[in-house]
Amino acid sequence: MAVTVLYLVRHGKAEGSHAQGDRHRALSSEGRDRIAHMAPLAQSRDFHAGLALSSPYLRAVQTRDLFAPVLSPSRLETSPVLTPDADPREAWDELLAWEAQGFDRIAVFTHNPFVTHLAALAALPGTEAVFHTPSILALSFGGGLDLYAGRQLWVLHP
């Protein structure tokens, strides 16, 4: 089965620094509130996926988990190729592997600037990819994941 929809989601607003480092920063109360406000709006736009894949950083996992009730994924996963300094091409290869396993709708929860670079690989040239905390970019693929082929379905900002 080929991927038909890819959602690129930037995590919600996070707390400031954390004593144990960036990967341990949690969502702030404002970040949680924004997601609570956005979730029904995303649901009204047919926001659902079989796979919800996130960076292992706490704020991305928390964002994924807060959107999960409306997303209704059959599988929740984390991946080290979705961290802020990861290589978007490695992430693309991982998305292709998930597609080969039969997932046709995938939601990716990650960070900026990484999500902007991943959107540049996924979307048709000229697609505006601006990501606030949080933002969702929904891309449609006619025949599966192809570089630079995703057509923007919708964008949702807080």
Image (cartoon, rainbow, N blue to C red):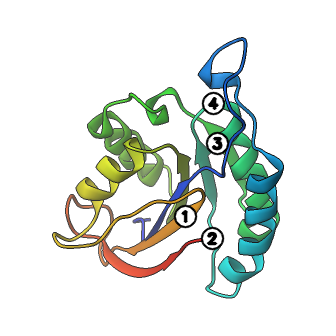
Residue 105 pos. (x, y %): 53, 66
Dot in front, 4 or 1: 1
How far apart are the alpha carbons under marks 1 and 2? 7 Å
Crowdedness near tag 1: few (<14), some (14–19) or many (≥20) residues, C-alpha within 10 Å: many
Which of pointers 2 and 4 lies earlier in the amino acid sequence?
Answer: 4
How far apart are the alpha carbons under marks 4 and 3? 6 Å
Residue holding disc 4 = 57
Crowdedness near tag 2: few (<14), some (14–19) or many (≥20) residues, C-alpha within 10 Å: some
**Outermost residue to the top:** 20
Which residue is depicted at the point 29% across and 73% down? 143
**Outermost residue to the bottom:** 44
Q: Secondary structure at mark 4?
A: loop
Residue nearest the viewer, comparing 155 with 138: 155
How far apart are the alpha carbons under marks 3 and 2? 16 Å
Residue holding disc 2 = 158
Q: Secondary structure at mark 1?
A: strand
Which of pointers 1 and 2 lies earlier in the amino acid sequence?
Answer: 1
Dot in front, 2 or 4: 2
Question: In the image, is residue 27 above or below residue 135?
Answer: above
Residue 114 pos. (x, y %): 38, 42
Do the CB atoms of the residues marked 4 and 3 lie less than 8 Å apart? yes
Residue 145 pos. (x, y %): 31, 61
Which of pointers 3 and 2 lies earlier in the amino acid sequence?
Answer: 3
Q: Amino acid at mark 2?
A: Pro
Do the CB atoms of the residues marked 1 and 2 lie less than 8 Å apart? yes
Label placed on residue 60:
3
Quarter of the image where the N terminus is located: bottom left
Q: Horizontal placement of 2 versus 30: left or right?
A: left
How far apart are the alpha carbons under marks 1 and 3? 12 Å
Which residue is depicted at the point 36% across and 48% down? 96
Label placed on residue 135:
1
